[in-house]
Amino acid sequence: MRLLLVEDDPVLSRTMAQGLENAGHRVELAHTVEEAQHWWAVQSFDAVLLDLNLPHAVHARSGLGSGLTALRSARARGDRTPVLVLSARDSTEERIAGLDAGADDYLGKPYELKEVEARLRALQRRASGTADIVTVGQLVLDRQARRVNVAGQPLELPAREFDLLWELMTPPGRVLSKGDLSLRLSDGGEVVGENALEASFSRLRRKIAGSGAAIRTLRGLGYVLEDE
């Protein structure tokens, strides 16, 4: 995903940006209300991570502003980019104010990067309109029931292959890098390495052969699941 990270704390912003970039995202940083408004207006993003307590630029000399200023400005011009608020201002009233201003989700500080990643994935699914039932060729994924069918017949998959297929079909046609998939499929202290990932791809390709869906490798970019 291409992300705009709006955070005035230099240490936290660098740490967050590095973690998100390691996960395969592209991150643009903004540290003030004005920077956030500028980048949000001139660039296209898949999602915005927005702090609320933000300084104005030096020339404004107005002390602390609010990320809600940038959010309201974006919504007023019709920008529907998904927004995840990340803020230490975590009372019920402040959460309501953020959501009413146009935020799609709200996460209080402190938070863990893996939860931010999970919420971004949820925002992306909603923004892309990915339904509970996803079909490519004769391959059908029921995301709510966690079932897979090929030509109407159940396809039993071990957990890792199911999770891999889930990522490739949420939504179909999305290119995912090897590093991104490795991070998404890793669980707790277990990291899914390159060899394990390749083995999962090999088995999954064999199992969906003939379904009308194909996993393609895009050199230097990653993997994509498409209709044959």
Image (cartoon, grey):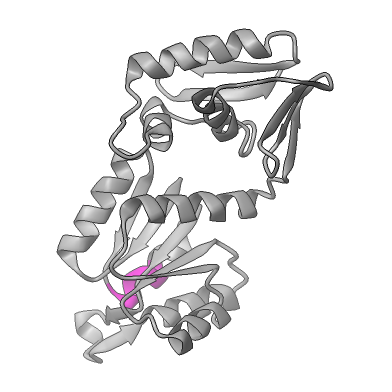
- The residue lying at 83 percent from left, 18 percent from top is 151
Chief SS of the magenta region: helix
Residue 212 picture quarter: top right
- The residue lying at 36 percent from left, 78 percent from top is 52
Taking the magenta stretch, the answer to whether it contains residue 37 is yes
Q: Could you tell me residue 156's position as x and y percent?
A: 66, 20
Residue 91 picture quarter: bottom left
Foreground residue, 30 or 211?
211
Foreground residue, 195 or 32?
195
Q: Is residue 192 above or below residue 107?
A: above
Task: Say left or right for 190 vs 131.
Answer: left
Farthest-out residue, bottom: 62
Task: Say left or right for 192 vs 212.
Answer: left
Q: Is residue 54 above or below residue 22?
A: below
Q: Is residue 80 above or below residue 22?
A: below
Farthest-out residue, right: 152
Foreground residue, 168 or 28?
168
Task: Say left or right for 86 vs 14.
Answer: right
Q: Quadrant of the C terminus?
A: top right
Q: Could you tell me residue 118's position as x and y percent?
A: 46, 51
Does the image show residue 14? yes
Residue 183 picture quarter: top left
Q: Could you tell me residue 172's position as x and y percent?
A: 64, 32
Does the image show residue 44? no
Image: magenta residue range: 32-38
